Image: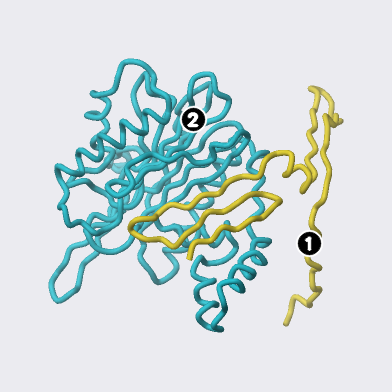
Chain colours: A cyan, B yellow
């Protein structure tokens, strides 16, 4: 996530829709960019932001991850959750309706707090959850402020999938088998015609990561989400580039039977471990 | 350039360049019937007190061959 109005998307969030349930995962880094004049900026990272959102009863069968722009005004999406919940009805909502209400709420906050000439990255929300009496989860994505209408992913019968966003470069490479810039680079380097580019693209489809999501148990979907985020954090740590991902990885599952459940979640800590050793 | 890759065995990718307006990418799984034609899926049950797995079922099978491994000396 980035808190300035410049630069491109940072952070990384993932939702996996598997046959046994949904997995939501996000890292914890927030990047604050401070202009210091003459076109230069200072980037400062904090590694304890909350980008995996959970909600109080009766909305315990839904959750969300956010990436892109970190804050609306000076507040994170996570900080708005209590106010959002205060406006929700007392009954459980279908996931699509929940996503719409969350989008409407966040758009109101955006319009109240952000400049009209904002040109930075959107703040993206991926909302996942279960409708009553449905076997499989639902996943909706919306972007504030540019695309506020939630769109559903993997909505065909028996279709599962992965939605990921933010600093996608390393996950794109892993899943697709090559960097997303490859086709444009090759096209320009050898002056390929559009039909040839399409041909090349089809030929490269065979190196896609073979992920049999329809057969993957929930634990393996959890492992896959952590693998993608941990790999991105490690790759950024070891290479030259914007280190927009870091800190603990929060992970939760949503199942039809148990609803939203944290698998791993960072905690607020002090120095008690130091005090007890004195 | 947006890319719409079709990998019949496992699923479809929807990946476009990362911009301020487009930060997300999607993977759409292949349906189970098509998937089970591409890979072998076997399910086993192990009973308590027995190490003998009982095969519950399987589906077949068109696993694409792995490329041959080039044998090299570990010291180059």
The location of residue A248, given as percent across then percent down, is: 40, 47
Residue B66 bears which disc, if any? 1
Picture residue at 31% right of the left edge, 37% below the top: A103
The location of residue A200, given as percent across then percent down, is: 63, 70
A11 displayed left or right of A153: left
> Does B38 appear above or below A179?
above
A77 displayed left or right of A223: left
The one of A59 and A261 positioned closer to us in this rendering: A59
User: Which residue bears the numbered disc 2?
Assistant: A254
> Does A185 appear above or below A243?
below
Instruction: State the quadrant of the C terminus of chain A.
Output: top left
Which secondary structure lies at badge 2? Answer: strand
The location of residue A150, given as percent across then percent down, is: 38, 39
Q: Quadrant of residue A148?
A: top left
Picture residue at 40% right of the left edge, 72% below the top: A240
Q: CA distance from mark 2 to mark 1?
A: 36 Å
Category of crowding for the residue at label 2, using alpha-carbon neighbours closer than 10 angstroms: few (below 14), some (14–19), many (at least 20): many
């Amino acid at each position: 996530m980035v808190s300035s109005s410049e630069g491109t998307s940072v952070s990384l969030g993932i939702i996996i829709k598997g046959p046994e349930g949904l997995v939501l995962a996000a890292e914890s880094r927030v990047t604050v960019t401070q202009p210091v004049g003459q076109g230069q900026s200072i980037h400062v990272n904090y590694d304890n932001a909350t980008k995996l959102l959970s909600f109080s009863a009766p909305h315990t069968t839904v959750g969300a991850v956010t990436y892109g722009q970190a804050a609306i005004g000076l507040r994170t999406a996570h900080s708005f959750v209590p106010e959002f919940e205060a406006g929700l009805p007392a009954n459980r909502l279908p996931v699509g309706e929940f996503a719409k209400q969350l989008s409407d709420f966040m758009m109101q906050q955006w319009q109240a707090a952000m400049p009209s000439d904002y040109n930075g990255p959107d703040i993206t929300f991926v909302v996942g959850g279960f409708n009553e009496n449905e076997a499989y989860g639902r996943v909706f994505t919306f972007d504030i402020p540019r695309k506020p209408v939630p769109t559903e992913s993997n909505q065909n019968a028996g279709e599962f999938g992965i939605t990921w966003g933010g600093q996608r470069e390393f996950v794109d490479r892993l899943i697709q088998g090559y960097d997303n810039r490859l086709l444009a680079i090759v096209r320009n380097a050898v002056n390929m015609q559009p039909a040839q580019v399409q041909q090349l693209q089809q030929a490269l489809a065979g190196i896609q990561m073979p992920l049999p999501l329809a057969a993957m148990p929930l634990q393996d979907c959890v492992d896959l989400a952590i693998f993608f985020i941990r790999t991105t954090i490690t790759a950024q740590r070891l290479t030259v580039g914007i280190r927009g991902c870091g800190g603990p990885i929060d992970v939760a599952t949503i199942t039809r039977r148990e609803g939203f459940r944290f698998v791993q979640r960072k905690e607020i800590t002090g120095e008690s471990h130091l005090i007890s050793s004195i | 350039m947006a890319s719409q890759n079709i990998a019949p065995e496992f699923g479809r990718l929807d990946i476009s360049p990362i911009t301020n307006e487009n930060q997300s990418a999607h993977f759409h799984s292949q349906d189970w019937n098509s998937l089970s034609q591409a890979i072998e899926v076997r399910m086993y049950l192990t009973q308590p007190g027995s190490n003998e797995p009982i095969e519950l079922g399987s589906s077949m099978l068109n696993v694409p061959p792995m490329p041959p491994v080039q044998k090299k000396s570990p010291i180059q």
